[in-house]
Amino acid sequence: MRREDRGMRPRPPTRVIPPTRALLKTRVNPRALVPTRVILLTAALVSAACILPAFARGRDDNRPASAAPSLSVLAPQSAYPGDCAVVILEYGDGRSSSEATGETRVEAALRDETGATRARAAAFALDGSRREAAILALPPGMTPGNYRLIVASVSADGTVILSDTPCAVEAREFVSETVRLDAANTAIKKDASAERMAQIEELNGILFRQDAGAVRFAGPYAAPLQSSRRTSQYGERRTYAYSNGSAERTTHLGIDFGIPTGSPVYAAGDGRVVLAKSRVTTGWTVVIEHFPGVYSLYYHLDSLSCGAGETVRTGTLIGKSGSTGLSTGPHLHWEFRVNGEAVSPDWFVGRVLF
Ligand SMILES: [Zn+2]
């Protein structure tokens, strides 16, 4: 995947209403996750009704105020650039999440010390609508430091903070490499044909799509092959040296496994194949949707064993490795995207998301 394949993530405007302290009661868990119990007390709900119209306006108008919804928010205390931060919301009072939020949208965001949002994700419902989850993708170039993880209910008339907790983004080193491209690969990289542009647009259209109904596979995820021979790592700062003497700096967005052409490649998790075709840059390509906004990608295959629309399981043979597209030798490029952002595939291996 090339850098130009990445589009701009839509950033809906939000208005933030500062949290009412009486509504937030936090206890710290010594483990990595910090559960934040947000209890909307009766008195607080009444007094805050003017700023929390979404909560005060439940579907059941006859519901007594004493049965106001309670909500647990699980959010990580720290994360690394290139990894994900999973936020889980659990509604514990018998109401579904959509009722509790007055049919508003719930978002999680990481804000730096200037208040700027550096990562953002919309929540989607798990197991019916009692729990919701948001998967924040931290870009590999994210600056380490002190951030705040904000979970907010976004309604048409403003944004209400549900929880606001510290989250440290740790330092992470990425190596550098130079990849020399011959004339044929340089031509692929410089290809500005309508065909290639349409393919980039098509793939971005898939990767930035968050289909709330695509709750398919929580894990554990698996590596797509048995080889451990890696020729490039995720997040490497890569310099392309072109055959005409020019150069371009970019970031390698997946893992390259150096394996012989014809090696079997398996699905990393249950999901639905949403793209299976030949592309100019990535050769024979498979993209699998695992969760709303969560996709695994497989590039430079020699042949495919699956088609778009098919359902696959972890370990399903999806193709054979090769060297098609922009490639300097037989290898598999394996990538994960979350809401359009490329994140470390290693973060997913062996992991159960929820
Ligand atoms: Zn690669």
Image (tube, helix red, strand yellow):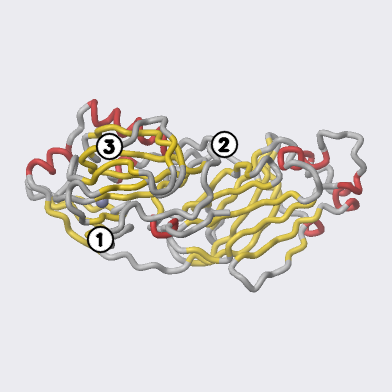
Q: Is residue 148 left or right of residue 64?
A: left
Front in this rendered view, residue 102 or 131 = 131
Under mark 1, the amino acid is: Arg
Q: Quadrant of residue 282?
A: top left
Q: Which residue is mark 3?
A: 304
- Which quadrant does the N terminus fall into? top left
Who comes first in sequence, dot 2 or dot 3? Answer: 2
Badge 2 vs badge 3, beta-carbon distance below 8 Å: no
Q: CA distance from mark 2 to mark 3?
A: 28 Å
Q: Residue furthest top?
A: 194
| Residue 89 visible somewhere in the drawing | yes
Whole-percent x, y for residue 243 in the image = 7, 47
Q: Position of residue 225 (x, y in %)?
A: 31, 54
Q: Looking at the image, tell me whether mark 3 or mark 1 is earlier in sequence order.
A: 1
Q: Which mark is residue 230?
A: 1
Q: x, y percentage for residue 98?
A: 71, 38
The residue beneath circle 2 is 212
What residue type is disc 3 on?
Leu
Residue depicted at x 29% and y 28%: 198
The single residue placed furthest to the bottom in the displayed view is 30
> From the viewer's perspective, is the residue at label 1 or at label 2 nearer?
1
Q: Is residue 161 above or below residue 214?
A: below
Which residue sits at x=63%, y=44%?
126
Does label 1 or label 2 sit earlier along the sequence? 2
